Amino acid sequence: MSPAPTQHVETVDFVMLYIVGISVILLLGITATMIYFVFKYHRKKGHQPVDIHGNIWLEIIWIVIPTLLVLSMFYFGYTGFREYRDIPKGAYVIQAKARMWAWEFTYENGKKLDTLYVPLGKPIKLEMQSADVTHSLFIPSFRIKEDVMFGKTTHLGFTADKAGSYDIACAEYCGLNHSMMYTKVIVLPEEEFYTWLNKKEETSNPAEAVK
Amino acid sequence: MSDGNSTVIENSFYKQSTNKHTGILSWLLTVDHKRIGIMYGVTILFFFLVGVIIGVLMRLELIAPGKTIVDAQTYNSLFTLHGVIMIFLFIIPGLPAIFGNFFLPIQIGARDVAFPRLNLLSYYIYVLGAILALLSVILPGGAIDTGWTFYIPYSVRSNTNVSLPLLAAFILGFSSILTGLNFITTVHRLRAPGMTFFKMPLFVWATYATAWIQIIATPVVGITIVLVVLERLFGVGIFDPALGGDPILFQHLFWIYSHPAVYIMILPAMGVVSEIIPTFARRTIFGYKAIAMSSLAIAFVGYLVWAHHMFTSGMSDTARWIFSLLTFIVALPSGVKIFNWVATMYKGSIDPKPPFQWVMSFIFLFSIGGLTGLVLGSLATDIHVHDTYFVVAHFHFVMFGGTGTIFFAAIHYWFPKMFGRMYNDKLATLGVIGFFIGFLMLYFPKFIMGYMGMPRRYYDYLPQFANLQLISTIGSWVLALTIFFIVGYLIHALVKGKRATSNPWGGVTLEWHIQSPPPMENFKEIPIITHEPYDFSQLKEMKDE
Ligand code: HEM
Ligand SMILES: [Cu+2]
Ligand SMILES: [Cu+2]
């Protein structure tokens, strides 16, 4: 099993590393060249400036190479996105409702709760709606978010690979207590999840549930 | 080339008025593009400093988790006001209104802009918009708390004064459109004989490209604002889903303007860079046409990428990848500029005076801003960092590290010409260093916090962010103190500075051919242009004149 909370986390971190890696090389290259020129061609050294109007080959090189680089970035970004958007058929569906300033999750059997419980290793699909303004359901540890709107259902999919409890935040500004719309997603092994689901009394205390 | 390189300072535009009035009225009613530029300068600098102070207050609130100085409602109003002031009152008008007004006519050998009265009108429209924005803070109802993006449905539901600042933004739009119109006409009609398009300085090219965006994109935000106000006041359902409207439509319309607007912010700054590097390297610019054309490319491709602000907004997946691809394409012309600028330093004769130091700082900070834009353009990563501190860091690096830095570069470059005085070079170098250190401390930690999952527009935060938030707040003090230090020594130099010669840096564009400060009508005789804009072989003739 992968050590990351979801497979998608590894994908996103890889794309991030790829883009940042190339960026750091470019940044250092540009900066070092600039500083080198400033020392090498310092006026105190009595250089006669040379008027060079340009070089068509250089212009071509520094258009073509960056084009190839950004196209590769686009490609990795796109495939990573597909991986997260293509939710397998038969995913376990949970309804999510956002309101100023709380979350509510409803399960197939009608159970309602402000904390999100999900079974380990099973594809999950959240069907989300807002009761008022636009919010955004953000799970930083899973590297995913999607806006939650009034009058339109949006969805968010993931498959948790590691049991545990992770933060959920609201990422779309929604007024006074926007910064306090935190809750948790709690990943339980499948059996425990179903035991929890079919228990009568509702618990909203994540600490109890994670045993 | 004939010019007014005499040492008579008496006939500078400070002494000669375009109207019969003297004193303050001779300024308030002036149609001289230079005086109007300076009036914009004073007003815009004032709002910038107000925005900085609000920024520092926000950072103070965020120094530790929990409440520090203000409550959540006040914090929400503070970031909205900060954003509105910085965007609509500082960075969008900034460079074109101050330096475009002052130098665009001079650089093409004109005596004024094409419509001098319209120019003064634009200034008063700007002031009217600014006053309305400030009024909305004082009036009962409370200061707007929607964020500068005014997203619906929240902005329809908020009980604060939303309509008035929207009206202010609407009015400010007209100021921007009229200035754009004026500059386009000026460039087409008033170039001196011999000044073909490809002999124009690159600052003129950049301001010209910007002007096109101003007149084409700004009406869209005007229309959108009118629709929002109709919705708020009369309950017409356009964007609010509760009334049968579509909130994503609002986001589209908003960004159709506001994305091109980021190029209104950055293009003139790029123009200034293309002036400063040749002057201090004393050689011609590398890739003149590549730089000029990349401005136009940015201006036009820039219209097609707006929805990259909406990758998590519930827009269709097809739209998401198309806009992602286009966003990567629009990054290329900016890259081309950076490479050409660095190449311009090759085999120059470089004297890294303060304006050049600002440009070096710009190249570093703006590159970080641009490169982190690639993280936001890529779908997989943007889904994670969208609406987090990563974005806050990114846009401060681009707008503040980019355009803001060049705002200071431009002041230091043209200060001797505008005011006829020199400032102290050593103090100026201290300013560059303080700004650089403060800036990185303030904003770099925000990239890390964003990737760790710290959302933006948060009044409070989880304990794991405490250390980085603290560093960021300390950075805000270093940065703000440096800014006030810079304003301080510049004001001192206005009064006590050494008199500037007509050409202290050895520049060759037309403003350096006339006295400092320039006479009212700029040129006694309209010059006839024979040289390329950055042909430093003129320097010798200029000295002999
Ligand atoms: C010392 C100077 C500055 C400081 C300390 C500062 C600080 C901040 C802070 C703390 C935020 C709120 C971040 C959040 O919680 O989402 C913010 C937002 C913002 N800042 Fe600055 N900033 C400064 C200068 C600038 C400048 C020069 C510009 C523009 C050129 C700018 C444009 C913005 C914008 C557009 C926002 C977003 C407002 C919103 O979310 O609606 N800031 N700034
Ligand atoms: Cu929220
Ligand atoms: Cu944009």
Image (cartoon, coloured by chain):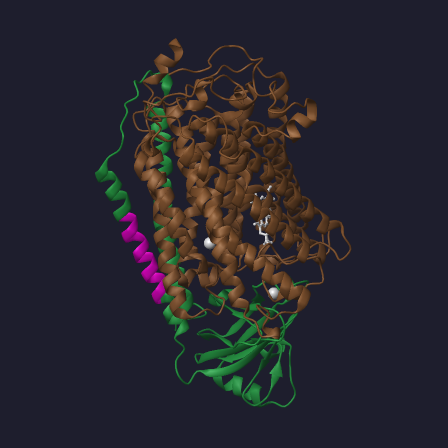
Image height of B278 relative to B140, above or below: above
Q: Is residue A74 magenta?
A: yes
Q: Which chain is brown?
A: B
Residue B469 as seen in the image, left or right of residue B314? right
Residue range (magenta): A65-79
Q: What colour is chain A? A: green
Picture residue at 51% right of the left edge, 60% below the top: B253
Write down the quadrant of residue B303 in the picture.
Answer: bottom left
Task: Locate residue B12, reporting x and y percent.
Answer: 56, 17
**Residue lying farthest right?**
B140
Instruction: Kindly identify the residue that appears in the image at 52 percent across and 73 percent down.
Output: A164
Q: Quadrant of residue B198?
A: top left
Which residue occupies the foreground of this view, A183 or B178?
Answer: B178
Q: Position of residue B370 (x, y in %)?
A: 42, 47
In this rendering, the answer to whether A125 lies above or below B337 is: below
**Horizontal placement of A64 versus B35: left or right?**
left
